[in-house]
Image (tube, rainbow, N blue to C red):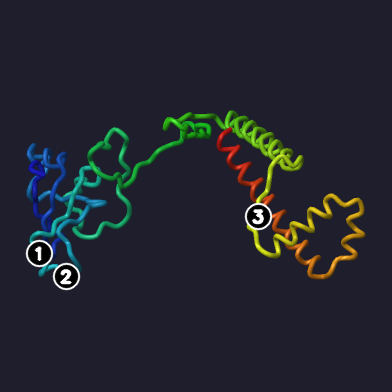
Amino acid sequence: NSTAAKIELTDGWYSMNALLDVLLSKKLAAGKLFVGQKLRIWGAGFCGWVGPVPPLEASKAVSLLLHINGTYRAHWADRLGLCKGNGAPLAFRCIKGTGGPVPSTLVGVTRIYPVLYRERLSNGGFIMRSEKMEAKMTQLYNQRCSVVAEGIMSEFQRGVKDFHINDDNDSEEGAKIFKILETAAEPEVLMAEMSSEQLTSFAAYQAKLEATRHSDMRKSIEKALEDA
């Protein structure tokens, strides 16, 4: 940034460059930052760093990135180096919107807002609801889903829907037996006279028919709920 100033910092042993953000650069231009001044710094960034190296071998391109929300004037007698403890919390009036992260602030809770729910609409918009309204809408939605599902299940139970399964030898044999038993006056008598192979084919066909029925019913319910 062409408006960012560069300064040199030292902890008493080593030194390195630091880039100031716009607001700190203005403080420097106004004479509020000067040579010999001590600073307390929290949350500084780092640029030009590619890996750990001894301090005396660090490139001049390596710099700290200072922002005004984490940079404070220190007392002239404060010891240089690592700061122990947390810094003083910033008041809201001292926090700058473009001044970087806020290391700490002290606040009190004055109000707890109710929980709000946001629903995305099909047109891309949003609608906000209170917790009470959301519970009501959820109940209405569940009721609508139950009505739709019950209607689809009733159609299947009345036999309105047709079922189709893949044809193979067992299915063809089982289908024939199924139709015979379906129209027979006494299907139990016919089943008692069937061979084990016929009973197996019938049971396999009946299982496939039931699986197909459940699959078709589930797909129909899902599609109906999407269209509802």
Q: Position of residue 37 (x, y in %)?
A: 12, 49
Which element is circle 2 on?
Answer: loop
Residue highlighted by disc 1: 59
Which element is circle 3 on?
Answer: loop
| Image quadrant occupied by the N terminus | top left
Distance Cα–Cα, label 2 vs label 1: 9 Å
Label ID, residue 53:
2
User: Which residue appears at 9% of the width and 59% of the height?
Assistant: 61
Q: Which residue type does callout 1 highlight? A: Ser
Camera-side residue: 100 or 205? 205
Distance Cα–Cα, label 1 vs label 3: 74 Å
Residue highlighted by disc 3: 165
- In the figure, is residue 149 to the left or right of 106? right
Q: Which residue type does callout 3 highlight? A: Ile
Camera-side residue: 115 or 214? 214
All told, the count of numbered labels is: 3
Camera-side residue: 65 or 174? 174
Disc 2 + disc 1, Cβ < 8 Å: yes
Question: Which of the 4 quarters of the picture holds residue 158?
Answer: top right
Question: Which of the 4 quarters of the picture holds residue 91?
Answer: top left
Label ID, residue 86:
none
Distance Cα–Cα, label 2 vs label 3: 71 Å
- In the figure, is residue 166 to the left or right of 60? right
